[in-house]
Image (cartoon, rainbow, N blue to C red):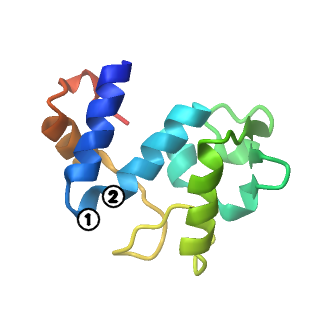
């Protein structure tokens, strides 16, 4: 994703209705961690250590499953994760689907809609 595409996507999310707001957190986490989408959507709060500034993705939650992955939390990510930890107190997951009260399993429909609103081609259609 280019810088221009990233800016257009984030702008499209900001201008979209509430159904798309969760995508901004997912995109920001993805851009700042290089985590896979399944790791982001399945991230449990217990993986996050804000004091140490690290996310520990257990090997069982990874595609390759070699060893636990330690992902640094940078200054952009810290306030986003702090807010999500506060906002989603009733769930073990960091990012919660407000309709189901549990984790997202896919964001494909919303992602496709945002890409269309941002005027971005289908090459980024799989998040």
The answer to whether 87 is drawn above or below residue 123 in the figure is below
Locate residue 111, reporting x and y percent.
Answer: 28, 44
Q: Residue at x 19, y 27 (%)?
A: 120
Q: How would you rate the neighbour count of disc 2 (Cα within 10 Å): few for under 14, some for 14-19, many for 20 or more?
A: some
Quarter of the image with the N terminus is top left
Graded by Cα atoms within 10 Å as few (under 14), some (14 to 19) or many (20 or more), the crowding at tag 1 reads: few
The answer to whether marks 1 and 2 mark residues whose Cβ atoms lie closer than 8 Å is yes
Residue at mark 1:
18
Q: Is residue 43 above or below residue 66?
A: below
In this view of the protein, which residue sits in the foreground, 125 or 61?
A: 125
| Quadrant hosting residue 6 | top left
Is the C terminus in the top left, top right, bottom left or bottom right quadrant? top left
- Name the mark on residue 21: 2
Q: Is residue 102 placed above or below 5 in the rendered structure?
A: below
Measuring from the top left, give residue 50's x and y in whole percent.
77, 55
Task: Name the residue rendered at 43%, 41% in the picture.
Answer: 27
**Left or right of residue 30: residue 117:** left
Tell me the element at label 1: helix
Query: Does residue 35 appear in this view?
Result: no
- The reply to whether residue 73 is in sight is yes
Rendering coords of residue 106 (x, y %): 37, 52
Q: Secondary structure at mark 2?
A: helix
Relative vertical location of residue 118 with respect to residue 50 in this rendering, above or below: above
Q: CA distance from mark 1 to mark 2?
A: 5 Å
Pick the front one: 114 or 36 = 114
Q: Residue furthest bottom?
A: 90
Which residue is found at the position 21% from the left and 36% from the top? 115
- On screen, residue 94 versus residue 12, left or right, reads right
């Amino acid at each position: 994703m280019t810088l221009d595409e990233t800016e257009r996507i984030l702008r499209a999310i900001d201008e979209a209705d509430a159904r798309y707001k969760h995508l901004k957190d997912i995109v920001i986490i993805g851009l700042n961690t290089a985590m896979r989408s399944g790791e982001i959507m399945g991230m449990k709060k217990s993986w996050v250590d804000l004091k140490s500034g690290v996310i520990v993705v257990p090997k069982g939650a990874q595609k390759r499953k070699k060893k636990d992955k330690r992902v640094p939390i940078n200054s952009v990510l810290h306030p986003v994760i702090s807010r999500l930890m506060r906002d989603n107190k009733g769930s073990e997951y960091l990012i919660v689907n407000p309709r189901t009260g549990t984790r997202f399993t896919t964001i494909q429909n919303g992602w496709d809609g945002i890409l269309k609103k941002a005027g971005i081609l289908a090459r980024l259609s799989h998040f």
